[in-house]
């Protein structure tokens, strides 16, 4: 509701983003943003994407106007990052990203945001979909009575380009291999898309007229 004149702008060269993962306040003067950064900017919307990407932590100091960037994961094509939605706007340790050149995401990974540098350090779990299989954006669903931020399930729609079959993968987010708990074959093929969501039974009931 504040006027546009109160908007604060920051100079952050090379920070080209399409999908943000999370952001939170730290102290009185700092905003922390977690996001994939894509380069070069002019090739971001090419299909298939012809640019590199990696997840970074970017700190904006609202008092001094300074910007600091820390590379969390380099050397991996990561996009469409998601978190446990109970932690939106709060400090987060884990994120889950699609891996591959858009739209050919052939795996999903779990990132430890406290780590930095190479993908060997920051990718703490990974699930490959298999040859000729591509997925969309993953979605995290917290377990009932979750004991930790990453206690829950990772959902992803995956399509088999050869067989023409789509399935919903339900993965254990605590597993170092993102172990598949269930693979549910869908009655119809679902075309590859960008984003994912999850609606539980209680939410469905609220939508009924």
Image (cartoon, grey):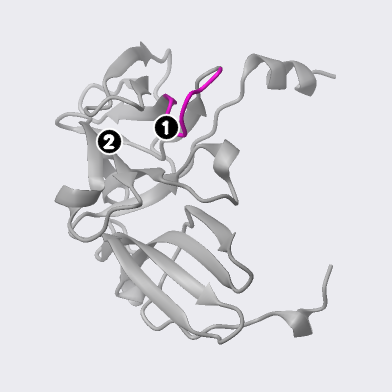
- Residue assigned mark 2: 134
| Magenta highlight range | 145-152
Count neighbours of disc 1 (C-alpha within 10 A) and say few if under 14, some if 14 to 19, many if 20 or more.
many
Quadrant position of the C terminus in the picture: top right
Q: Is residue 43 above or below residue 147?
A: below
Tell me the residue at 47%/71% (across/down).
Answer: 59
Residue picked out by circle 1: 150
Q: State which tag comes first along the sequence, 2 or 1.
A: 2
Q: Which mark is residue 54?
A: none
As for residue 151 lying within the magenta part, the answer is yes
**Quarter of the rendering containing residue 174:** top left
In screen coordinates, is 87 left or right of 34? Answer: right
Is 134 positioned to the left or the right of 188 in the image?
left
Query: Which picture quadrant has residue 105?
Result: top left
Can residue 192 be seen from the camera position used here?
Answer: yes
149 or 201, nearer to the observer: 149
Residue 151: x and y in percent read 43, 26
């Amino acid at each position: 509701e504040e006027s546009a004149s109160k908007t604060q702008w920051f100079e952050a060269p090379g920070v080209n983003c399409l999908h943000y993962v999370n952001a939170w306040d730290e102290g009185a003067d700092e905003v922390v943003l977690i996001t994939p950064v894509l380069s070069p900017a002019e090739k971001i919307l090419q299909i298939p994407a012809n640019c590199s990407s990696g997840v970074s932590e970017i700190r904006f100091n609202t008092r001094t106007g300074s910007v600091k960037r820390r590379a969390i994961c380099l050397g991996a094509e990561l996009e469409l990052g998601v978190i446990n939605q109970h932690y939106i706007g709060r400090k987060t340790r884990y994120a889950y990203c699609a891996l591959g050149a858009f739209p050919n995401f052939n795996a999903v990974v779990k990132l430890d945001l406290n780590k930095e540098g190479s993908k060997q350090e920051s990718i703490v779990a990974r699930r490959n979909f298999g040859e000729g299989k591509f997925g969309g954006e993953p979605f995290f669903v917290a377990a009932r009575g979750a004991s930790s931020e990453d206690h829950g399930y990772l959902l992803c729609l995956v399509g088999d380009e050869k067989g023409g079959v789509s399935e919903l993968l339900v993965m254990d987010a605590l597993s170092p291999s993102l172990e598949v708990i269930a693979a549910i074959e869908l009655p119809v093929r679902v075309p590859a898309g960008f984003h994912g969501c999850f609606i539980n039974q209680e939410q469905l009931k609220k939508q009924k007229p």
